[in-house]
Image (spheres, rainbow, N blue to C red):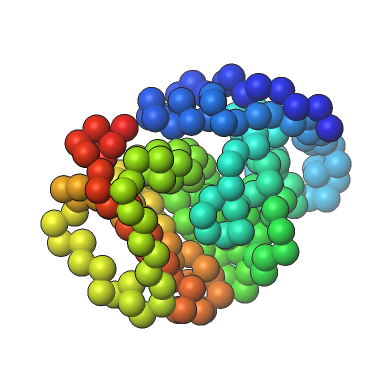
Amino acid sequence: MNLHPYNDVSGGLTQRARYFVSCHGIKVDIKSINRQWWLERNIPTAVIDRMATYQQRWGGLVLPPAPQYDGGPKYFYPDVPECSPSGGWSFEAGDQRSAVPYSFMIGPADEFGIHSHQWTPLHATVEGWVESLALTHHASMFAKQITKITGDDVDGVVLDDYELVREVKGLADTWWRGADSLVAVYTGEAECLSFPAARTALIYSGLDEWALGG
């Protein structure tokens, strides 16, 4: 497998995320979308077009592992489209790094999420997932303390005076910015697997004004 620097980070990302991808992302060679093969299996053309667009933008990108979901996808690669019972098509976002009981998927509205016995969108876009990884890397570098809270104790994390970090486009997973801390709340596994104990909050505290925004 050949490795290359990943330089195409234009559009849709903050400066922080562009810097993160350009410094820490690499690209591996992947196969092109075989349109005819999918057409012969009755996959709609519009779905194949979405897969091709995803591959052109993200295909082969390898990023550092996420703190949750056993690191996230090993690299981005579209595969195995499927129609949900409620309508709309999803496709795999890339292989898992390790054995987890769900797949990483791109949803009917291009959300990034996980699917096991149910579909759980984590971020409204792939960019949101990448922004979350970039923010994790940034906050980990500058926080004076990192506190991990799990299960029912997550309910005790008070976010009344925090503002939502909108660039991560959070759905099941969200980020919050306070006076001197950043808080990441992960509920994706808990929702997808109906396992409330999997809820996790990471509190990055002791951040100055610059570190809060990056």
Observer able to see residue 121: yes
**Image location of residue 68, percent across then percent down:** 52, 59
Residue drawn at (57%, 31%) of the image: 24
Residue 89 point in image, percent of width and height: 62, 53
Q: Is residue 54 or residue 48 the one in the foreground?
A: 54
9 vs 147: above or below: above
- Residue furthest out toward the front: 144
41 lies above or below 14: below
Q: In which quarter of the image is the N terminus?
A: top right
Question: In the image shown, does 133 or 119 lie closer to the viewer?
Answer: 133
Foreground of the two, 2 or 207 = 207
Where the C terminus falls, by quadrant? top left
Can residue 109 be seen here? The reply is no
Q: In this view, does 168 lie above or below 82?
A: above
Residue 71, position as x, y percentages in the image: 60, 53
At a point 48% along the width and 31% down the height, the residue shown is 20
Question: On the rendered structure, is 212 left or right of 32?
Answer: left
* Residue beneath the point at 25% across and 74% down: 156
Residue 36 left/right relative to 55: right
